[in-house]
Image: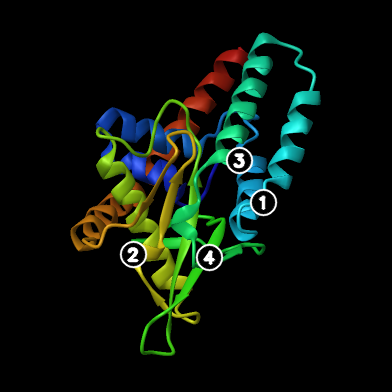
C-alpha cells in the first residue's frame, strides 16, 4: 500500500471536481492499487507525441509505434479492444494540428521531473515538453510546459469540461513557476493541456488564485484523510485474511 500522500495530476483534477463517495474511492485506489495494470499503450504514445512536438511535427516515432501495435497479437477480445483504441489514439496524436506551437521553442523532457507539492500532497505532473519564447524588450524568456491528456471516455475539454481543463492548466502553470524559474518567467499562456482524443489544445487560464486555493484545500483534505483510509483498508485486509485462515 502507498505510504505517503501522492496523486497524479489527472486524478487530482478529478478529485477536485468529484462528490464525496468518489473522492473516497480515488484515495482508496491510490493507497491500494489494482493488482493488474491496464496496458493502454498511452505512455508509449505520449513519449512518441513528445518527439513530434519537439521536432516540428515529425510523425516518424508515431508511425513506428503504429506498426508495433498493428503487429501485436490479441489473445482476448478485451486486448483487441485495447489495441484498436491505441491505434486510434496514435492516429489522433499523429494528425493533431500543432500550429499553436509555431514560433515557440519546444524541447522534449528527457529526465525524471520532481513532483509538485501542494499542501503536503505530492502531485505527479510529468510534463512531456518544455516551451520557451523570447519577450520583446527584455532578455528574460517566457517559459511553460506541455502535458498531453489521453482519454476516450472522460474528455478534458468541451462545454461540460471547461473547469476540468482550467484546473489542469492551473497545475501546469503552478508547476512551471515552481521548477522552471531558472529558465525564465512562467506564463499561463505557455502552459498547454493537449486533449489528444478531443483534438483540443488549451492554455492555462490567467485567473488562477481562487483555483489554487481550491486545489490547496483538496490536497489538505487528501492528506488529512490518508492515514484513516489506509488504516481502514489494512483492517479490512486483515479481517479477510482471518476469515480465509479459519
Q: Nearer the viewer, mark 3 or mark 4?
A: 3
Expressed as whole percent of the image width and height from the top left, the position of residue 164 reads 31, 42
Q: Residues within 10 Å of mark 4 (few under 14, many from 20)?
A: many
Verify CB contact (< 8 Å) between mark 3 and mark 2: no
Q: Which residue is mark 3?
A: 94
Element on which disc 4 rests: strand
Residue 102 at x, y percent in the picture: 49, 61
Is residue 124 in view?
A: no
Depth check: give the residue in front, 1 or 183.
Answer: 183
Residue linked to disc 4: 130
Looking at marks 1 and 4 on the same chain, the residue that comes earlier in the sequence is marked by: 1
- Badge 3 vs badge 1, beta-carbon distance below 8 Å: no
Residue depth check, mark 1 versus mark 2: number of the one nearer the observer: 1
- State how far apart marks 4 and 2 are (Cα): 13 Å
* Labels 3, 2: front one: 3
How far, Cα to Cα, is label 3 from label 4? 19 Å
Q: Which mark is residue 58?
A: 1
Earlier along the polypeptide chain: callout 3 or callout 1? 1
Who comes first in sequence, dot 3 or dot 2?
3
Q: Is residue 81 left or right of residue 230?
A: right
In the image, is residue 241 above or below residue 224?
above
**Which of marks 2 and 4 precedes in the sequence?**
4
Which disc, if any, is residue 188?
2
Q: Are marks 1 and 2 in contact (CB under 8 Å)?
A: no
| Quadrant containing the N terminus in the rendered view | top right
Amino acid at each position: 500500500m502507498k505510504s505517503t500522500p501522492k496523486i497524479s495530476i489527472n486524478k487530482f483534477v478529478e478529485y477536485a471536481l468529484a462528490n464525496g463517495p468518489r473522492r473516497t474511492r480515488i484515495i482508496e485506489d491510490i493507497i491500494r492499487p489494482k493488482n493488474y495494470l491496464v496496458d493502454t499503450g498511452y505512455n508509449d504514445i505520449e513519449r512518441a507525441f513528445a518527439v513530434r512536438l519537439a521536432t516540428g511535427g515529425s510523425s516518424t516515432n508515431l508511425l513506428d509505434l503504429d506498426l508495433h501495435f498493428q503487429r501485436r497479437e490479441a489473445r482476448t477480445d478485451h486486448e483487441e479492444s485495447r489495441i484498436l483504441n491505441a491505434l486510434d489514439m496514435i492516429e489522433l496524436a499523429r494528425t493533431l494540428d500543432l500550429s499553436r506551437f509555431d514560433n515557440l521553442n519546444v524541447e522534449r523532457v528527457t529526465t525524471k521531473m520532481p513532483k509538485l507539492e501542494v499542501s503536503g500532497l505530492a502531485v505527479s505532473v510529468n510534463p512531456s515538453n518544455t516551451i520557451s519564447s523570447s519577450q520583446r524588450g527584455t532578455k528574460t524568456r517566457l517559459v511553460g510546459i506541455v502535458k498531453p491528456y489521453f482519454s476516450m471516455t472522460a474528455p478534458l475539454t468541451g462545454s461540460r469540461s471547461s473547469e476540468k481543463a482550467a484546473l489542469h492548466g492551473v497545475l501546469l502553470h503552478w508547476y512551471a513557476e515552481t521548477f522552471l524559474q531558472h529558465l525564465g518567467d512562467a506564463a499561463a499562456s505557455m502552459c498547454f493541456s493537449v486533449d489528444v482524443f478531443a483534438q483540443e489544445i488549451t492554455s492555462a487560464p490567467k485567473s488562477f488564485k481562487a483555483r489554487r486555493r481550491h486545489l490547496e484545500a483538496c490536497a489538505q483534505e487528501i492528506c488529512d484523510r490518508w492515514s484513516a483510509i489506509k488504516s481502514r483498508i489494512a483492517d479490512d485486509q486483515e479481517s479477510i485474511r482471518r476469515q480465509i485462515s479459519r
